[in-house]
Image (cartoon, rainbow, N blue to C red):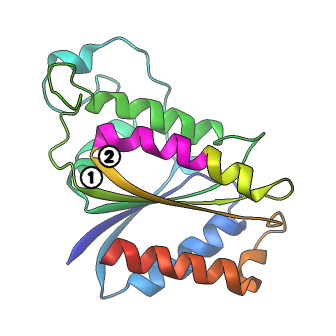
């Protein structure tokens, strides 16, 4: 059974990220082992760029926060799905901190700069924008998802649901729900 990590980067408990998370977790029941990590409820500090992780030759960080505790989960999962709103044309700050902390997987002595235990993992990024051009935001998401390759996520897909500012409105958007269903199927394949 595949192990899928769902990372929710929204602070809105009743927002679209949480609504879609609940739907996906239900879909995956009995099909995958699912772990969720809701950044807004966790202590994820910014990377200190201290390079202490580079001396350990195993994915780790000297900070003692919820991200450090999640590193083994990130390293051992088969796939990860990120659910997040678009903030000011970019990742929300807490997700950017999460991404920056994957620096702890980087090893400059390796040809691919990665000390991830597995380098064949899939990453799905599903984002929500209230206003603005969803196609431009999709390019931003894709450009940033590729940086998770250091943590072993070499294959990725992105989707941005437009006009999704009203909390829970994603559940009334058949085309965007279909895109989520296709992502889930791809993660399981």
Left or right of 25, for residue 135 = right
Whether 150 is among the magenta residues is: yes
Residue at 79% over, 67% down = 164
**Does 129 appear above or below 56?**
below
Residue at 74% over, 44% down = 87
Q: Position of residue 185 (x, y in %)?
A: 40, 80
Classify 10 Å Cα crowding around label 2: few (below 14), some (14-19), many (20 and above): few
Q: Are marks 2 and 1 in contact (CB under 8 Å)?
A: yes
Q: Which residue is mark 2?
A: 70
Which label is found at residue 73? 1
Left or right of 81, for residue 189 = left
Q: Quadrant of the C terminus?
A: bottom left
Q: Bounds of the magenta span?
A: 141-151
Q: Position of residue 83 (x, y in %)?
A: 57, 60
**Does 3 appear above or below 53?**
below
Alpha carbon separation for disc pair 2 and 1: 5 Å
Residue at 67% over, 77% down = 176
**Residue 66 seen in render:** no
């Amino acid at each position: 059974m595949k192990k899928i990590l769902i990372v929710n980067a929204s602070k809105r408990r009743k927002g679209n990220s949480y609504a879609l998370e609940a739907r996906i977790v239900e879909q995956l029941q009995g099909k995958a082992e699912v772990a969720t990590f809701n950044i807004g409820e966790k202590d994820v500090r910014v990377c200190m760029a201290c390079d202490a992780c580079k001396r350990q030759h195993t994915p780790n960080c000297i900070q003692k926060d919820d991200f450090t505790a999640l590193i083994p989960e990130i390293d051992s999962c088969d796939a990860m799905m990120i659910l997040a709103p678009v903030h000011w044309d970019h990742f929300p700050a807490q997700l950017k901190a999460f991404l920056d902390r994957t620096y702890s997987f980087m090893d400059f002595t390796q040809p691919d700069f990665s000390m991830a235990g597995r380098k064949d993992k899939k990453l799905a990024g599903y984002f929500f924008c209230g206003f603005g051009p969803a196609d431009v935001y999709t390019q931003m998401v894709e450009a940033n998802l590729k940086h998770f390759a250091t943590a072993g996520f070499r294959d990725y897909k992105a989707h941005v649901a437009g006009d999704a500012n009203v909390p829970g409105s994603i559940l009334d958007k058949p085309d965007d729900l279909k895109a989520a269903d296709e992502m889930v199927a791809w993660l399981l394949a």
